[in-house]
Amino acid sequence: MTELPARRLMLVHAHPDDESITNGVTMARYAAEGALVTLVTCTLGEEGEVIPPALAHLAADREDTLGAHRIGELRHAMRELGVSDHRFLGGPGHYRDSGMFGTPANERPGCFWRADVDEAASHLVEEIRQVRPQVLVTYDPDGGYGHPDHIQAHRVAMRAVELAADPAHRPDLGEPHRVGCVYWNCAARSVVEEGFARLRARGDGPFPETASVDDVPGVVDDAEVAAVVEGGDAEVAAKAAAMRAHATQIVVADPPSGPPESFALSNGLSQPLLRVEHFRRADGVVPAEPVRDLFEFAGAAGGDR
């Protein structure tokens, strides 16, 4: 087996673009430091709304070719972040974007929400046993904001962590591996509020309206945060570039000077582009002060190095 880098980070996300918005700084930082950063994306995001009018024909209710297009966007985003190891759960298009609850897409056979959790988790077990990450990042039980695919990504990731460590589970998928520390994405309330305050004070953004704190996924009280990753100018620039690469889904504002500070999704509402990313520990442990390195807990939790 090829020798692996000393530090290995795996991130499990639901759709292309989730990784750049939520973890762009984190991925850019650890990739630049020489860690193996592995992204596993669960769907192609086929049900996403398309922002540029010239690409509206890609949408699910027209040509239904958005998923294939977003593979290219994701590939571009990974280049911007310096990440070379990207995989789709079960292979590209194995699971389809489920859309929101109550929509026809959510009832569609083959959508990720309808997948058997253990079956989907076994695909991730194979990736975990191959990469052998000390740290895994995914969503909280609500998926950050209640999207079915985000909830399912949480369920699949947590089950896969359990099964990957079990020698009795599918030995054909590789040697057992216990992930040292699992984190759930979140956003510290004070940082999000400060970001919105800057946008309101600036008042010169390209977007007609501003979102609210409640529109940001995974906002929690500062006291719940276990780890913080803060980006310098290079990491923030990489995150902004990766977000721009997802051009069907995101518009990043170009300020007159300085780094980008805001972006909007298909609703056109401005929200802050955060240069600080936050995490909770899946086991609920909260240190006296948030750590600044996701790998700090990995050894104590038992992950092999």
Image (cartoon, grey):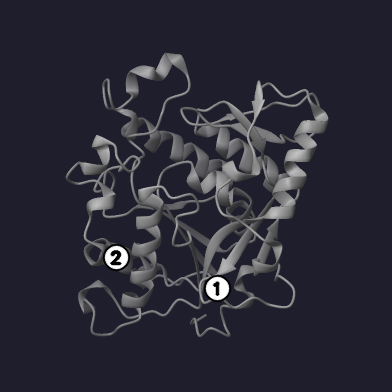
Q: Hey, what amino acid is under mark 2? A: Ala
192 sits to left or right of 145: right
- Note whether 158 is above or below 303 in the view shown: above
**Cα gap from disc 2 to disc 1, whole angstroms:** 25 Å
Q: Position of residue 77 (x, y in %)?
A: 51, 40
Residue 166 locus on image (x, y percent): 30, 83
**Which residue is pictured at 52% across the width and 33% down the height?**
245
Furthest residue in direction top, as rendered: 54
Give the vertical position of 256 relative to 298 (above or below). Answer: above
Q: Amino acid at mark 1?
A: Ala
Disc 1 packing (10 Å; few <14; some 14–19; many ≥20): few
Q: Secondary structure at mark 2?
A: helix
Percent x, y for residue 153? Answer: 38, 57
Look at mark 2 in the image and give the residue it sits on: 121
Q: Nearer the viewer, residue 104 or 110?
A: 104
Q: Earlier in the sequence, mark 2 or mark 1?
A: 1
Residue at image coords 21%, 76%: 170
105 to the left or right of 136: left
User: How many labels, in total?
Assistant: 2
Q: Which mark is residue 6?
A: 1
